[in-house]
Every structure is written in structure tokens, then in C-alpha cells.
Amino acid sequence: MPALRRAAQAEALGLYLHVPFCLDRCTYCSFATTRDRSLQPETIQRLIAEVTAWGAALGRPAVDTLYLGGGTPSLLSPAELEQLTRAIHHAFDLSPLVEATLEANPGTVDLAWLQQARDLGWDRISLGVQALDDELLARLGRIHGSAQALEALDLARRAGFLRRSADLMVGIPGQSLSKVLEDARTLAGTGIDHLSVYLLDLDKACPLRADIDAGRLALPSEDAVADAFEALQEELPQLGLAPYEISNYARPGAESSHNSRYWKRRPYLGLGPSAASQMSAFRWTETGNIAAWTGGRGELEFQELDPAEALAEIPLLGLRQHAGVDWPRLRSLATGQNLLPLVDAWERALDQHLKRGLLEREGPVLRLTNRGRLLSNQVFELFV
Ligand code: SF4
């Protein structure tokens, strides 16, 4: 704990809180979340206790970004949201706070709840829209339709949120390229200042995976998905949403400060089932078993990165961002840690990606090209 306390005092933290409850389970979801809400009061009280305990253990450190994610944070009762927010203010020094985001499901918000969240200081909202097609939304098991998603974005505007973000999903069975583009245009037209574009990820067992494996539904081809991402890369900047990370687009100045800290390797503390934390060379994850976490029985998965692993994270995460990686700076960091041979080996391997047009150099900066963003895993595997 003394090493974590020193790290938390050296640089402002990001604080992530996980609310692991949903009204229903989406057909593609593999997050640590449940629709059994009988545990909700106890879990939220435990979350509040954890906020208080960690704030004290780390010496009431400064926090400059807050993120209430899930699950569905918009399922918190007004009293729970208020209690949790007050606990955060009490346990941490929020004087440098630049952003306080909460995630919400469009099927669970009303104006009064949003206004209360705004009054409590939450100033940015991220709405899980996913698509603006009722058939696709039903296929995903979402609890809302497209009209409700657009209404939720408008309610958030009326409640006074300074920043509004939406998620758009690509690769849904039955989703056409023209529909992806139409949804992107409609969402940009609502005045949102941030859009996250995700590929439907069916890594783990879930009902949608079972439907695909049984041949009841078919995923779009890899080419069709690549075409959709490429078309969005061209379209979204024309709609005022510039790419700043592989999956994220924003109006100038509206980039997510909290999510950016993950790619910049700035420290964060995550509390709640399955939440991850990182401070200096230490990284840990809480159990994803909600009942065990709430009962205080979950084990932490703790890892201390060695210097080579920590160095590899700089290009691995840095190349996700459009700003790219300052390569001479990376070399000089490596020199100080006797890791220059590792960087030399990366350079030799990266050469082929430069020649294939997946990477480009601009002065000292190395970054992915548009094509490289589509095939980024081929580059990233080098650093894993
Ligand atoms: S709302 Fe999000 S966390 Fe909840 S089931 Fe759906 S995808 Fe999973």
C-alpha cells in the first residue's frame, strides 16, 4: 500500500466505478453484470464503503476524471446516486476535476433523473445507442428502440449535460453499410460531440454467438465490416467528428479525458466487480463475481509489470491514438532502462508494416495509417 499511496499522491487519478446491474441482458454481452437486482442495495453500499476506504488508504488523492460505468448506472435510484456522489467528494480531492462521465442506457432515463445527475456534478453522458434500427436493436436484445435512443440524447441535452457521447456498433447480423452511415449521420445531426464506434465482439459464449454458430444468423463478412469502418473514417470527419483513437471520434476539445488516460498510461483506480486499476507498475482487477464482490469474498488479480512489459505498453496503447508515438522519446526511455535492444527489435519488425502502408512516420511520430487502423491487430501483436 505505501507504493500505491506514493503513486496516487504523485499524479491525479482517474476514478472508475462499476455498477453491475442491467434491466435485461443484451444478446452479445459478456460484461460483469446481472439483471438480478436483489443485490443492488447491498452492492451500492459496498461500493460506497470501498470509495471511502480507498480514499482514506491513498491519503485522499486528487482525482481529475470520474467515470460511472456498467452495467447500467442509470438504474441507480436518485438516493443511491446522491449517496455515491457525495462519498466520492468526501473521499477524494476533486479540485482538479475536468470531466465526470456517466454511462446510461436509453431505455432507463427520464428528465428528472438526468437533471439530478447534472445537479450532482456529472457533466458528460455516454449513451449506449448501438444502432438506429429497431430490428437490429431487437436482435441485440437492447431494451430500447431507435426513437427512445434519440429521445434520450435530447433529454440529456435538455438536462444540461455539457458533453454527450453515443456508441455505434458495427458488424451486427443484418446491418448494411448504408444503414451504418445513415445512423452515423443521424447521430451527428443530434449535436453529440463524441461517437464511439465498436465492432460487435462475440469472443465469449452468449446467445447471439449461439444463434450464429447454429446458422440462424450470419455475421457480415470481414470485408463488409472493413468497408464500414473505412466509410466511417471518411464520413465522420465531414460531420465534424474527428478520429482521435481507433474507436473514438470527437468534435475538437470533446475527446474523452477519462478514456484517454488509459491510452496515455495515466493512473486510475477502478472500484466494483471486474473493475481494473493501474498505478505506476502495478495493475489489478477485482473479481467479476458480483455476489462474491459484494460479500467481500472476491480475490484481486494483482500484477506487477516488469520494465520491458511497461515499455511495450507505450507503443501498444500509444498507436491506438491518432497522435501516435514519439519514437525518439521511447528510445530514450528505453536507453535509461537498458532496453534499447528491445526497441531495435521492434523497429526491424515494424519496417514491414511501414512498407505495407499500415504505419507512417511524421517527424518523430510513428502512427497507424487509416488502413493500419483496420488491421491494427497485425501491428499490436508485436508488443504483446
Ligand atoms: S446494457 Fe450493456 S452491460 Fe447491460 S447487458 Fe447490455 S451490453 Fe451488457
Image (cartoon, grey):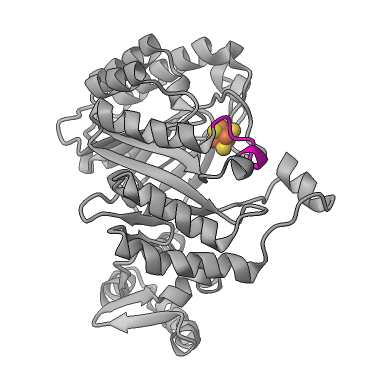
Which one is in front, 16 or 341?
Answer: 16
Residue at figure coordinates x 76%, y 51% from the top left: 217
Outermost residue to the right: 214
**Viewer can see residue 319:** no
Q: Is residue 82 above or below residue 93?
A: above
Residue at figure coordinates x 23%, y 20% from the top left: 119
Tally of marks: 0
Residue at figure coordinates x 35%, y 56% from the top left: 249
Q: Is residue 355 left or right of residue 67?
A: right
Give the x, y percent position of residue 181: 47, 59
Q: Is residue 147 left or right of residue 204?
A: left
Q: Which residues are magenta?
A: 138-144
- Say which quarter of the image contains residue 370: bottom left
Q: Which quarter shows the N terminus? A: top left
**Viewer can see residue 344:** yes
Q: Is residue 141 magenta?
A: yes
Residue at figure coordinates x 58%, y 23% from the top left: 23
Q: Is residue 188 above or below residue 87?
A: below
Which one is in front, 324 or 8?
Answer: 324
Give the x, y percent position of residue 75: 47, 20
Give the x, y percent position of residue 8: 28, 38
**Dominant secondary structure (helix, strand or loop) of the stretch shown in magenta:** loop
Which one is in front, 161 or 154?
Answer: 154
**In terms of image quarters, where does ligand 1 lie?**
top right
Give the x, y percent position of residue 358: 46, 80
Q: Is residue 320 left or right of residue 58?
A: right
Q: Is residue 161 magenta?
A: no
